[in-house]
Image (cartoon, rainbow, N blue to C red):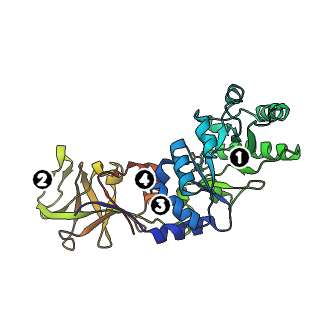
Amino acid sequence: MTAIWSVDAQRFYNNALKVIQNNQIMAVVKNNAYHYGLEFAVQQFLKAGINTFSTTSLREAVRIRQLAPDATIFLMNAVYEFDKVRDYQIQMTLPSLNFYYEHIEDLQGIQVHLEFENLLHRSGLKNIDEIREVIHHHMKNANKNKMHITGLWTHFGYADEFDVSEYNVERKAWLDIVSTLIDEDYHFEMIHAQNSASYYRENGVLENHTHARVGIALYGSRPYQTIDVDAIEQSLTVKGNVIQIREVNEGDYCGYSFAFEAKHDHTKLAVVDIGYGDGILKSRAKHEALINGKRYPIRALMMSHMFVEVDHNVHAQDEVILYNNDIRVDEFTFKCVGANSEQLSAMNHDSLIKEYR
Ligand SMILES: *Cc1c(COP(=O)(O)O)cnc(C)c1O
């Protein structure tokens, strides 16, 4: 008995089809495909009809190229290993005016996507004048081997927020830039801006855009709560096992440092073989686990164990589910445990047994 992290491959694939619908999707596979496994995810997405991928690391981009020789691969971070970017035909962001002027020579033969900074302020050209400056300078550059401008993109920092107006602000600023450039007869092979939240908020890909750049929905979590629970399916299961059942009495403290005080006699505690060392967040342990189809409260979290308060229906060797499609990562996101990607990223892939079924 060891705690297990497992993915149902069929369900993962079905979910990808559900998310894609009839839209052109650029699958975000950064951080080892949100820790679902880069190779697994790329293969499933290819099968589901996606042939455009993006990530933040060149190492992953090269790996994608090996898995998908014909794919379009977009690197969302600028890097300085220009030869490698060129050799593996990775398309790359152009993150600033400075970067452009400093690396005009280095960028020869590389396909770049002009990035608009917008409200996130993480990267990108500051405004439409900077975008035009690059395009005009580039048009006058007589070097036959100069870079190629193939894309225009931005990233929304507030698409997942509903209580503030910033999404509408960044959305409008961006759409104005896109339509102005199109009116001025500039052409881009690819225009992309939307993460999962924006993709669902807009009911698909925005006008004039070629792709939505979707991550978390493809990994089975809803970016916000009002999306129908059946629209996105979670293929991941994380579970441990009941090692034994202990009985404690009123006033007994259980776990380290008085973690839990029994409220009545004959309290049954299941000792479970999964803990924060396996990646279960402390905030997650304030909620429940699923045993034999019923939810029971977690009472204490330790490195490789937890206590779950149970009843007479629970026995040694029963499975204790922390996450599956009935007790989903996104449920706990909406209960403020942490972002979907934060809960997924916490998982310890060295201590959990990994299975694809
Ligand atoms: C992570 C990321 C995405 C995907 O966001 P989700 O909310 O997971 O869909 C899109 N674009 C950029 C730039 C990102 O860093």
**Residue named by callout 4:** 344
Assess disc 4: are there few (<14), some (14-19) or many (≥20) residues with their C-alpha within 10 Å of its C-alpha.
some
Give the side of residue 287 with respect to residue 335, left or right. Answer: left
**Nearer to us: label 2 or label 1:** 1
Image point 85% across, 31% down: which residue? 140
Do tag 4 and tag 3 residues touch (Cβ < 8 Å)? Answer: no
Question: In which quadrant of the rendered view does residue 155 lie?
Answer: top right
Quarter of the rendering occupied by the C terminus? bottom left
- Rendered location of residue 68, percent (x, y): 57, 57
**Residue named by callout 2:** 252
Cα–Cα span, label 2 and label 3: 47 Å
Earlier residue among tags 2 and 1:
1
Three-letter code for the amino acid on which mark 4 is drawn: Leu
Three-letter code for the amino acid on which mark 3 is drawn: Phe
- Vertical side of 269 occupied by 134: above or below: above
> Residue lying farthest right?
184
- Vertical side of 48 occupied by 135: above or below: above
Earlier residue among tags 2 and 3:
3
Image point 66% across, 35% down: which residue? 95
Three-letter code for the amino acid on which mark 2 is drawn: Asp
Assess disc 2: are there few (<14), some (14-19) or many (≥20) residues with their C-alpha within 10 Å of its C-alpha.
some
**Residue named by callout 3:** 40
Q: Does any atom of ligand 1 lie closer than 8 Å to the CB of label 1?
A: no
Do tag 2 and tag 1 residues touch (Cβ < 8 Å)? Answer: no
Cα–Cα span, label 3 and label 1: 33 Å
Looking at the image, can residue 338 be seen? no
Give the side of residue 325 with respect to residue 322, left or right. Answer: right
- Rendered location of residue 241, percent (x, y): 24, 64
Cα–Cα span, label 4 and label 3: 16 Å
Three-letter code for the amino acid on which mark 1 is drawn: Arg
Local SS, label 2: loop
